[in-house]
Image (spheres, rainbow, N blue to C red):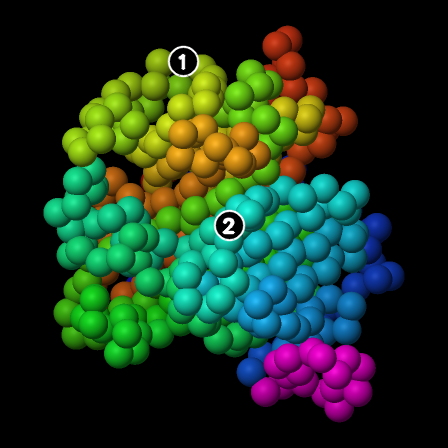
Amino acid sequence: KQTPDDVESAKLGAILGVNDEKYDEEYDEEDVNTDGDYSEADSENVEEEDMYPEFHIPGRVSIDAGAGGLPRATLTHVSGSVAEVYLFGANVTSFRTPNGAEVLYVRPDAAFDGVKPISGGIPICFPQFGPGGDSPGALPAVPAMQQHGFARNLAWEVVASGSDLGYGGHDVGLALRLCDNDYTRAMWDFPFELIYEVNLGEDELRCSLTVSNPGEVAFPFTAALHTYVSVFDVEDKKVNLVGLQDTRCYDKAMHPTKLRVRDQTEELVTFDGGLYDSVFVDTAPTVGLNVGTGASVLVSNTSGFTDTVVWNPGKEAMPGWYRDFVCVESGRVARPVKLPSDAIWESEMVITVLSEEAVLINEEQEIAELMEGLNEGERV
C-alpha cells in the first residue's frame, strides 16, 4: 500500500528508451539472478576475486573488493556505460557513459573505511535529511540523530542482480536491502525495510528507494538521494541549473542558524564561489544541470521525491575542490512522510546524460525547451 504522500510524475520512457535493434544480439533476457539462484555454468565463469558469486552475471554484474577493501558492485551495460555501487551505504560512486566520461563526483577527502559515509557519488539520506531535531537550521523532521541519518554509513545486503529489470529491455541492475538493527534502533526506534534498486542504461541511471513499515505504528521520515554531479568549473557561468524558476525555497546560506524562505525568480541558478545551500520545494519533475562542457545532466524525480536540494560548499569551506561539483539532490525534505503500519513509500530518481550533440547548451538554445516537454505531466 502506498500512502497519500506518495507523489508521482510521468515517466520519460519515450525519449529515454534505448534502440532495441542495436542490442538484440547482445542481450539475454534470462540473465536475472536472485538470492541463491545461479547456474553452475555461471559460477565457473566467476573470477576468483569476485565476491557474492550468486549475483555474478558474466560481463554484466560483478562484485569485488574496491577502495579500502569494501565490497563494490560493477554494472556494465552492453553499450559500454558503467556504474559502480559500494555496498557500504549503497552508494553509487561512479556512472560513466559509453565514451568514458564520468558523470558523478567523489571528493578527494572521501573515506573508504567502512565507518564514515563516503563523501561523493549518491549517498542515501534516511530517515533524516540534514541535522534533524532542534539543530540550528533544521527543517521540520524526525527526532535528532546524526547528519543525514544512518543509511549512508551501514553495510547493505545484495538481494538481486539482473540484466533486465524492466526498463528499456537492456538495463543491468542491482537490488540492495537494509533493515533495522540495534544500531538504528538506538537513534530511531522503528522497524523498517529499505530496498534500493540501481538500473543502468546507455545514457541513464535509475535509482529507486522503497521504504516499508512492517511495524504496528506509523513512523515519520525524510529522505534524499544526495547526488554529486561533476562539473567543469562551478564559477564558470556555463555551469548553471534550469527548471527551478518560480519555485519557493529554504535558503540555508542566507542565515547561519535560521532558515530563510525566498522565491527563485531567476531562470538560471548560478554559482559565485560562496556557499549555495537551498531546498527547493514542490519542484517540477525534471531539472537540468549544464556542466560547462557542452553536455548536460537531467535529474528527474519520477516518483515520491517532491523537492530538489542544490548544494555547493563554496571556496571557504572546500578551497581545493569546490569548483569540481554541484549537488543536485532528489528529496522528500520539506514535508516529512508519515508511513502507516504495513505500508510502503516508493521513490525514483533518473539521471540522464545529454551530450553536446544531443542538445546544444549556450545562450541561444538552453535545455529549458526540452524540459518544457518533459514537465508537461502534472503531479497527481
Q: Is residue 292 above or below residue 157?
A: above
Residues at marks 1 and 2, CA–CA distance in whole angstroms: 33 Å
Q: Is residue 57 above or below residue 15?
A: below
In which quadrant of the rendered image does the N terminus lie?
bottom left
Q: Residue at x 78, y 68 (%)?
A: 59
Q: Is residue 38 above or below residue 166?
A: below
Query: Observer-nearest residue: 3 or 296?
Result: 296
* The disc label shown at residue 288, or none: none
Q: Is residue 363 above or below residue 323?
A: above
Query: Observer-nearest residue: 144 or 217?
Result: 144
| First-in-chain label (1 vs 2) | 2
SS at circle 2:
loop
Q: Nearer the viewer, mark 1 or mark 2?
A: 2
Q: Quadrant of residue 63?
A: bottom right
Q: Residue 162 appears at what percent x and percent y?
A: 64, 69
* The disc label shown at residue 109, or none: 2
State the extent of the magenta-drawn residues as a range. Answer: 36-54
Q: Residue 327 appears at what percent x and percent y?
A: 47, 38
